[in-house]
Amino acid sequence: MVQNNYEILGVRDNATKNEIRLAFRKLALEHHSDKGGADAKFIMIKQAFDDLKVGKRFPDSPEDKKQKSRVTHGTDVEERKRRNRILSRDVSKEIRAAQEWLSALSRVNTTGLRLFGSKELGEMEFERKSTNALSIKGKFWAGSFTYDNNIFMWGSITNPYFSDDESNTVIHVTSGTFKMMDPVDNGFTIDNGAKILVDNGDIICGNIKGIKELIPDPDGRVGHTITKEHFTELIAPKGKIIAGTVQETTKLAADEILVYNLIDNIRVNARKIQVFGSKVNYDVYFELKKGGMIRFYDKGSGFDISDDAILKLENGKEFFLDDLKTLKLIGYGGKDITYNELDNLQNKQKGSSSLPFDIGKINPFSKK
């Protein structure tokens, strides 16, 4: 039997607002993760409290939750887009409010906890800790946000690529690390063109994915479309990026990058690059900085590298990865390939027994 929201909070059906509020505070303290509680229980308690504030007796059913997903339902495409743009702008406004609230806490150097977000999409819990770190729980849907210390994220991050630039998701950490908590076990992802910028720290996350969108031809030709790329971007110029599988239209730039697989339209720019999985395919482009190294941990001929995977040195030299595999520089289990080693290899045409070269000047890191 499904508990109603009064039962979840442990109060009588005709409880006063003050009784409900006191019950919520007591349970929240008991079940908050900082006290060793389970996140799922805390989220259920918080949702019951939010529901009762608007007079809602029972929690959402699975069908209700599906109706509150990011993409609204219906047959009119333009109406769905219009509705989603409105939701994105609403969330962006909430994120601006969160920014102002945290700035106020920072000025007086104090802690605080508040909910921000959208009833339709789900609220996020923002908490400024005594260490000055920021904890965010819940899915980050839209909006631009800057913080000057560590951010610990319990949730996924997406971007309303269908909306205007004002609603785009940009999280900027000026001093500290951005870390998703147990992202693989929890299924936390970054997708749809979201941007994470860390000036002086690391980015630790799960799987990453961009998106390609078919839009009507800008010249108005009937029946014609063009592909618009919405790159998910992670940038940590002085730190590391540690990620799972990266796929479909993503850019990574850092001093050091550690990833699992790279699949379909990926750009990687770093001084030190390490790939732990077995796939580097479909338009993957590496740019290695001077003095750096690149390492592929997979062993044997089963390493899946497509013909168009390219490695470029900072001085402009470019190589096909499958030719480096033929030379047994990669695919044999964790060998460091240094910048100097690559720079000193003789330039030959692609397909030669020695080394590839000159496939043209490509700059996939340029803004589109």
Image: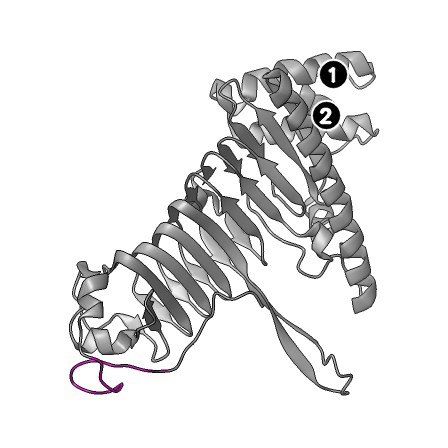
Q: Residue at x 17, y 70 (%)?
A: 344
Q: Which residues are magenta?
A: 347-359
Q: Is residue 75 visible?
A: no
Q: Residue at x 51, y 50 (%)?
A: 189
At mark 1, the secondary structure is: helix
Q: Mark 2 sits on what residue?
A: 49
Q: How is the image coloured?
A: one colour
Label annotation for residue 21: 1
Cβ–Cβ below 8 Å for labels 2 and 1?
Answer: yes
Compared with residue 265, is residue 64 higher up or lower down, i.e. above or below? above
Q: Earlier in the sequence, mark 2 or mark 1?
A: 1
Q: Residue at x 36, y 66 (%)?
A: 286
Residue 357 lies in quadrant:
bottom left
Q: Residues within 10 Å of mark 1 (few under 14, many from 20)?
A: some
Residue 29 lies in quadrant:
top right
| Type of amino acid under label 2 | Phe
Q: Nearer the viewer, residue 343 or 30?
A: 343
